[in-house]
Image (cartoon, rainbow, N blue to C red):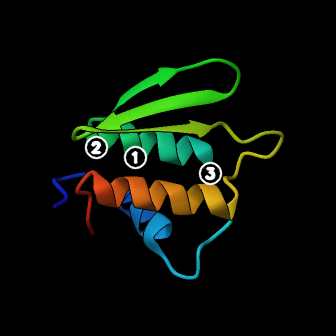
Amino acid sequence: MLGPIGSRHRKTLETVYERPTRADVRWREVLGLMQALGADISEGRGSRVRFALNGRRAVFHKPHPRPELVKGAVEALRDFLKEAGVDL
């Protein structure tokens, strides 16, 4: 279940859950969403970023040189959020 988050973060969440999977989800919007959800965020080596939310952990790579996540990363993020109990 989703607690109160701002409309901008809700829109990002809706974009992540959208089917077919989109390839225009911006990394900074994902970071903002994760912060709004109360996730623990820590940087690893290189471009790795660790998220911990509701007892679940995942590692993602900051996209570069473009600011958008590739579809596979969006799908992995969707799976992580579902496992962490984040629903629309």
The residue beneath circle 3 is 26
Q: Secondary structure at mark 3?
A: loop
Q: Amino acid at mark 2?
A: Leu
Q: Earlier in the sequence, mark 3 or mark 2?
A: 3
Q: Residue at x 70, y 58 (%)?
A: 70
Q: Amino acid at mark 1?
A: Leu
Q: CA distance from mark 3 to mark 2?
A: 17 Å
For residue 46, side relative to residue 26 (left or right): right
The residue beneath circle 1 is 33
Q: In the image as oriented, which residue stretches furthest toward the right?
A: 65
> Residue 29, image x and y in percent?
52, 47
Residue 17: image quadrant is bottom left
For residue 65, side relative to residue 71 (left or right): right
Nearer the observer, 83 or 31: 83
The residue beneath circle 2 is 37
Label 3 CA crowd tier, 10 Å (few <14, some 14–19, many 20+) = some
